[in-house]
Image: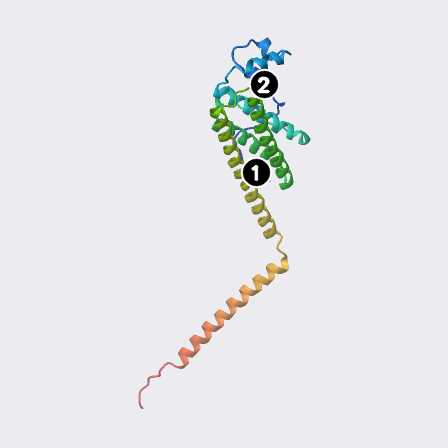
């Protein structure tokens, strides 16, 4: 069955391994990736993340959570491109990847629903993780929280659209299969009914013509 939902190619990739402190500004690479997490998080209490950095953290956590949720299927999705770190860009890219993941790997409704359900669970878990991390960093201000809320709304709307599309696709497929499964006896009955109706209509037309001819006035000359 050909399923077309998204518009981008899904690629195999592992969950994001980026640590929370790597999103903080003004640190060297060794400080961002090192084991001294306590000092990094302590410094975070006096640092404000940019809106872009916070959205990038949210996106990475959503992708990581989706991939974790999909582990049982052996599937995963790719991260979000750096230039798309806006609520709209993050939501659109993630939804496209989920849609393409279903289209590329599901050959039945059960498989499609499994991927969809696990990806949906991963999205919700990723959003919750992102909020918790940002809150722990002391960076969950009104602007950043608003961006996460917008991302969540766009993701939920997109998930509803994907689910509706799946319902339409498989309902349409079921209807076509039912039509193809019509029995020869049923087809013969329909054909016989059509022939009978045609014959009855022809007979009625012929009888009407005969009656009209029979009742027509006759003219003649007197001899």
User: The C terminus lies in which quarter of the figure?
Assistant: bottom left
Q: CA distance from mark 2 to mark 1?
A: 37 Å
x 52%, y 13%: residue: 25
107 or 131, nearer to the observer: 131
Disc 2 on helix, strand or loop? Answer: helix
Which quarter of the figure has residue 4?
top right
User: The N terminus lies in which quarter of the figure?
Assistant: top right
For the view shown, which residue lies furthest in the bottom direction? 223
93 relative position to 186: left or right: left
x 58%, y 31%: residue: 123
In percent of width and height, residue 156 lies at 53, 35
For the view shown, which residue lies furthest in the right direction? 72
| Count of numbered circles in the view | 2
Kindly tell me whether residue 23 is visible in this rendering: yes
In percent of width and height, residue 99 lies at 56, 34
x 54%, y 29%: residue: 94
Q: Which mark is residue 62?
A: none
Kindly tell me whether residue 11 is visible in this rendering: no
Which quarter of the figure has residue 196?
bottom right
x 61%, y 60%: residue: 186
178 relative position to 90: left or right: right
In percent of width and height, residue 9 lies at 55, 28
Among the two numbered marks 2 and 1 on one chain, the one whose residue lies closer to the N terminus: 1
* Residue at the spot of label 1: 3
Q: Which mark is residue 20?
A: 2
The nearer-to-camera label among 2 and 1 is: 2
For the view shown, which residue lies furthest in the left direction? 222
Disc 1 on helix, strand or loop? Answer: loop
10 Å neighbourhood of mark 2: few (<14), some, or many (≥20)? some
């Amino acid at each position: 069955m050909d399923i077309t939902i998204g518009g981008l190619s899904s690629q195999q990739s592992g969950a994001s391994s980026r640590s929370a402190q790597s999103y903080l500004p003004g640190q060297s690479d060794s400080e961002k990736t090192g084991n001294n997490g306590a000092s990094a998080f302590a410094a975070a209490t006096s640092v404000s993340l940019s809106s872009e950095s916070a959205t990038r953290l949210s996106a990475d956590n959503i992708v990581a959570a989706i991939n974790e949720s999909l582990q049982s299927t052996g599937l995963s999705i790719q991260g979000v491109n750096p230039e798309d770190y806006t609520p709209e860009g993050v939501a659109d890219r993630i939804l496209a990847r989920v849609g393409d993941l279903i289209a590329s790997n599901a050959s039945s409704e059960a498989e499609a629903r499994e991927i969809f359900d696990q990806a949906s669970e991963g999205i919700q878990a990723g959003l919750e993780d992102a909020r918790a991390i940002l809150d722990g960093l002391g960076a969950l201000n009104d602007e950043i929280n608003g961006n996460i809320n917008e991302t969540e709304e766009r993701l939920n709307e997109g998930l509803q659209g994907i689910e509706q599309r799946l319902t339409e696709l498989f309902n349409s497929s079921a209807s076509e299969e039912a039509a193809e499964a019509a029995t020869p006896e049923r087809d013969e009955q329909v054909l016989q009914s059509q022939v009978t109706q045609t014959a009855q209509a022809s007979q009625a037309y012929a009888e009407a013509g005969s009656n009209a001819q029979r009742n027509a006035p006759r003219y003649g000359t007197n001899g």
